[in-house]
Image (cartoon, rainbow, N blue to C red):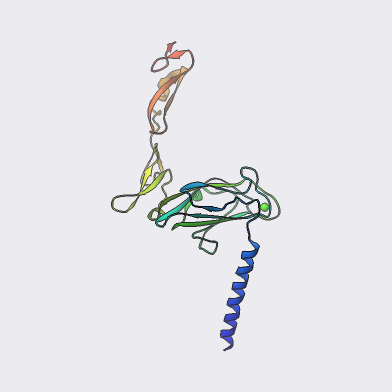
Amino acid sequence: MWPKLVILLSMSAVLFIRHTMASVTEPNPFCPQPNNYTSATGVITSPSFPSSYPNNADCYYYISAPVGSAIQLNFTTFYTEACCDYLYVFDGPDFNSPLIKRFSGILSRDWQVISSSSNHLTARFVTDQFTTELGFSAIFSRKPAICANQNCNNGTCVVDELGEPVCVCNPCFAGSRCEESAPDPCASLGSVCGTHGHCEYDHATCSGANCVCDAGYTGAFCTQRS
Ligand SMILES: [Ca+2]
């Protein structure tokens, strides 16, 4: 009889603590609002970004997508006080969902792109009372849930006709995970543009290398005076 009562009391205590936490973690007025993000893509940032974030921040970001999608976060900036100012990212609709990672300090390259496993991702940014830094900015986007664990580095994951995730690489990248840089189109042409020009190419297609001549010069290799 007593052990059951103790368990019941413990559960009540846990529920009470959760309720109390919820009531004291209302977003600060300086947090980005509204904080429910349902668009296909967008940006979340720390408060005041690109100025420094404030002390005593506690901000939430709720990102959701249609069922069957996963949500990807691509950090373009991340810099917080390493000891004390944290971004928590949760794999689900609220901060009771499994924690993907707690970030602080400077972001390592391995964690620049992260993904939820399903169609909800929640982030919480918490700072202490001293010392602020630049903060963070991250682009959120959707990808098929089957792509959640597929890191395409410099590309985009899509589902092929067999229902398998595959990477489609950005121009100038190759490899099964788009981890390899394709040959620079200017590598073979760069030197022939001589001392009066330089090589440029179409970055959208990673091709079309040609010499762009300095003022006063013309010709395929910038050797003629114009
Ligand atoms: Ca701080």
| Residue found at the far right of this picture | 130
Reply above or below: 91 against 18.
Answer: above
**Count of marks overlaid on the render:** 0
| Residue found at the far top of this picture | 225
Q: Which residue shows up at 61% across the image and 69% down it?
A: 19
> Which sits in the foreground, 72 or 184?
72
Reply above or below: 98 against 200.
Answer: below
- On the image, the x and y values in percent for residue 78 come to 57, 47
Locate residue 22: give its quadrant. bottom right
The quadrant of the picture occupied by the C terminus is top left
| Residue found at the far left of this picture | 162
Q: Which residue shows up at 44% across the image and 50% down it?
A: 142
Instruction: Report the side of 62 relative to 51 (left or right).
Output: left
Reply above or below: 35 against 175.
Answer: below
Locate residue 57: give its quadrant. bottom right
Locate residue 225: give its quadrant. top left
> Which sits in the foreground, 19 or 147?
19
The quadrant of the picture occupied by the N terminus is bottom right
- On the image, the x and y values in percent for residue 60 come to 58, 56
- On the image, the x and y values in percent for residue 79 come to 60, 47
Q: Which residue shows up at 42% across the image and 20% down it?
A: 193
> Which sits in the foreground, 66 or 182?
66
